[in-house]
Image (tube, rainbow, N blue to C red):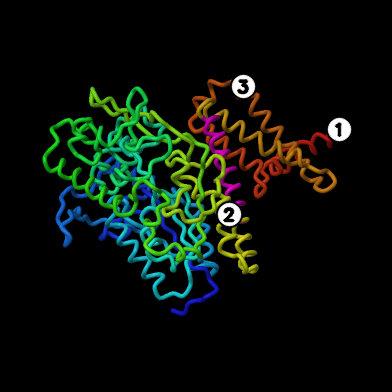
């Protein structure tokens, strides 16, 4: 295939939970593509996507490391509900031949050391024989699995836009999800049932990839924060000498994960699975993110620092939202309180500011603060980020930049329309819930005709006087009659549904039913009366 050297090469790597998962056989039947797949899993008795659970059996590879057995599910494309606006933007640019887009999706359930190798291979297949330097866009922990490739092959990239990027600094944030499953924070109080969870704790238990976030001894530590992500009741930070979260016996002692929610005794196979997950996670972090506690250590880089001089790095994130740093642990009672963070700091709700603002090896970067209300997952859809990408991709090509601006404008118009529709839907849902169908129909019958009546101009459209005078006559008559005999109308089957149809017919510009009533019914009566008077 002929390559257009002027067309920017763009690689997008989504974050955690942001790749669709589908079975190898059975077409594109969704296993993970929320919210639809969540409803499907619940209908099949697998609420909380329990059918996404990986095998908990492991085998050794050529290096002697244990590798989790595979299932018949693989990553296919990106989840729209998580990153819809960004995908629409990038895909539209690609469809209009403004960029060449490659989406590197990955199975976020599996170990990160396994995923990182597959990502290297896929990026190599894109970049190795292409003279163009790619613009790399990563979201969340997409940065974590992309970093080894960036470090070893900086010549493949011109720009790295690191949105809410997670590389350095481990976190205990996911301990909550191992205990309670994944659900929106507003649902946590009532999410005892799996049907209310995006991912059940049973499924989370099997996902080796999620253990990869736990901090490892020797990692860089945020100033004034706990190296283990745990703090004692008196505010003293726990050290790795106090507690080792990479040991399954610690999980058993402190009732973490499966040891908290499983009613039966945890089997030896389940315990072994957790230890294999923890070992794989520790290997991955120690290999790529442990350098004597110094985030700027040049040994993070596989090449001399000069090899990265051409690479523009933009770190995009939020520093205004309370973000988890540590859970409280009671060493005497052997309890980790994962329901609520004990220590927080400024960040994006998932990552403390220093985490997304720091690049391993001390590489130079530009820090751009996201839109004010953006959080870790939502910011990938920021309008500000899309304009940043336009400025990055089309620096000198004014023609492409102009076309990109039009695409962005069209997206904003569609967004405004979608917001208006959503607002109207919410308003009428409230009206329906508060006052029932009658009140909703009355309001519907009032708003549009009132607007059109106020817009009426006797000079421009004198004929509209008949339409709207007749409409208000019919509308008022119905209101008076319904008010006088409410019990009768309540017992007429489908009356209010029929009334809605009549209201639409009366005022719709294609039917103009009120004018029909005037011409067919009222005018003959008026003419007959006028003739009598004459």
> Observer-nearest residue: 233 or 200?
233
Label ID, residue 486: none
Tell me the SS state at disc 3.
helix
Is mark 1 in CB contact (under 8 Å) with mark 2?
A: no
**Which residue occupies 77% across, 44% down?**
464
Residue 488 percent location from the top left of the image: 53, 23
**Which residue occupies 24% across, 40% down?**
202
* For marks 3 and 1 on the same chain, the one whose residue lies earlier in the sequence: 3
Q: Gap in Å between the C-alphas at discs 3 and 1?
A: 34 Å
What span is in magenta? 410-432
* For marks 2 and 3 on the same chain, the one whose residue lies earlier in the sequence: 2
Secondary structure mostly seen in the magenta stretch: helix
Residue 52 can be seen, yes or no: no
Label ID, residue 533: 1
Q: Gap in Å between the C-alphas at discs 1 and 2?
A: 62 Å
Image quarter of residue 42: top left
Q: Which residue bears the numbered disc 2?
A: 411
Residue 478 percent location from the top left of the image: 64, 29
Q: Which residue bears the numbered disc 3?
A: 483
Tell me the SS state at disc 2.
helix
**Which quadrant holds the N terminus?**
bottom left
Neighbours of disc 1 within 10 Å: few (<14), some (14-19), many (20+): few
* For marks 1 and 2 on the same chain, the one whose residue lies earlier in the sequence: 2
> Observer-nearest residue: 104 or 344?
344
Most distant residue in the right direction: 534
Picture layout, residue 336 above or below residue 394: above
Residue 410 horizontal side relative to residue 10, left or right: right
**Front tag of 1 and 2:** 2
**Front tag of 3 and 1:** 3
Please tell me whether residue 468 belongs to the stretch shown in magenta: no
**Front tag of 2 and 3:** 2
Q: Gap in Å between the C-alphas at discs 2 and 3?
A: 46 Å
């Amino acid at each position: 295939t002929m390559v257009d050297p002027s067309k920017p090469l763009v690689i997008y790597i989504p974050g955690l939970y942001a790749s669709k998962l589908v079975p190898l056989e059975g077409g594109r039947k969704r296993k993970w593509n929320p919210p639809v797949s969540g409803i499907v899993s619940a209908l099949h008795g697998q609420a909380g996507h329990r059918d996404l659970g990986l095998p908990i059996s492991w085998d050794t590879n050529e290096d002697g490391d244990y590798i989790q057995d595979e299932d018949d599910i693989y990553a296919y494309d990106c989840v729209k509900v998580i990153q819809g606006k960004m995908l629409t933007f990038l895909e539209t640019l690609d469809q209009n031949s403004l960029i060449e887009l490659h989406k590197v999706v990955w199975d976020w359930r599996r170990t990160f050391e396994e995923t990182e190798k597959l990502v290297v291979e896929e990026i190599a297949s894109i970049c190795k024989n292409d003279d163009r330097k790619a613009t790399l866009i990563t979201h969340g922990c997409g940065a974590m699995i992309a970093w080894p490739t960036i470090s070893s092959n900086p010549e493949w990239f011109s720009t790295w836009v690191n949105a809410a990027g997670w590389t350095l600094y481990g976190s205990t944030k996911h301990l909550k999800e191992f205990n309670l499953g994944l659900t929106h924070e507003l649902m946590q109080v009532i999410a005892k049932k799996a049907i209310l969870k995006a991912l059940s704790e049973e499924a989370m238990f099997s996902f080796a990839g999620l253990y990869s976030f736990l901090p490892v001894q020797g990692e860089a530590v945020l100033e004034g924060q706990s190296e283990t992500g745990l703090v004692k009741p008196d505010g003293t930070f726990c050290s790795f000498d106090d507690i080792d979260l990479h040991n399954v016996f610690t999980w058993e002692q402190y009732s973490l994960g499966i040891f908290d929610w499983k009613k039966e005794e945890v089997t030896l196979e389940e315990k072994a699975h957790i230890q294999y997950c923890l070992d794989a996670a520790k290997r991955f972090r120690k290999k790529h993110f442990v350098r004597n506690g110094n985030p700027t250590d040049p040994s993070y880089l596989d090449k001399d620092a000069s090899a990265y001089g051409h690479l523009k790095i933009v770190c995009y994130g939020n520093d205004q939202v309370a973000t988890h740093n540590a859970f409280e642990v009671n060493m005497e009672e052997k309890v980790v309180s994962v329901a609520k963070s004990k220590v927080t700091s400024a960040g994006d709700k998932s990552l403390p500011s220093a985490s997304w603002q720091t690049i391993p090896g001390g590489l130079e970067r530009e820090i751009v603060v996201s839109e004010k209300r953006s959080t870790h997952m939502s910011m990938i859809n920021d309008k500000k980020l899309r304009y940043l990408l336009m400025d990055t991709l089309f620096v000198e090509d004014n023609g492409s930049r102009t076309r990109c601006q039009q695409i962005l404008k069209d997206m904003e118009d569609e967004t405004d329309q979608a917001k208006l529709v959503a607002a109207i839907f919410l308003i009428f849902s409230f009206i329906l819930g508060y006052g029932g169908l009658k009140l909703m129909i009355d309001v519907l019958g009032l708003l549009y005709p009132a607007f059109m009546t106020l817009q009426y101009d006797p000079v421009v459209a004198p004929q509209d006087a008949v339409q709207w005078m007749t409409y208000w006559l019919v509308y008022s008559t119905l209101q008076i009659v319904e008010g006088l005999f409410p019990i009768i109308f309540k017992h007429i089957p489908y009356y209010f549904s029929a009334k809605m149809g009549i209201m639409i017919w009366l005022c719709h510009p294609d039917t103009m039913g009120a004018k029909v009533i005037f011409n067919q019914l009222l005018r003959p009566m008026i003419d007959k009366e006028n003739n009598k008077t004459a």
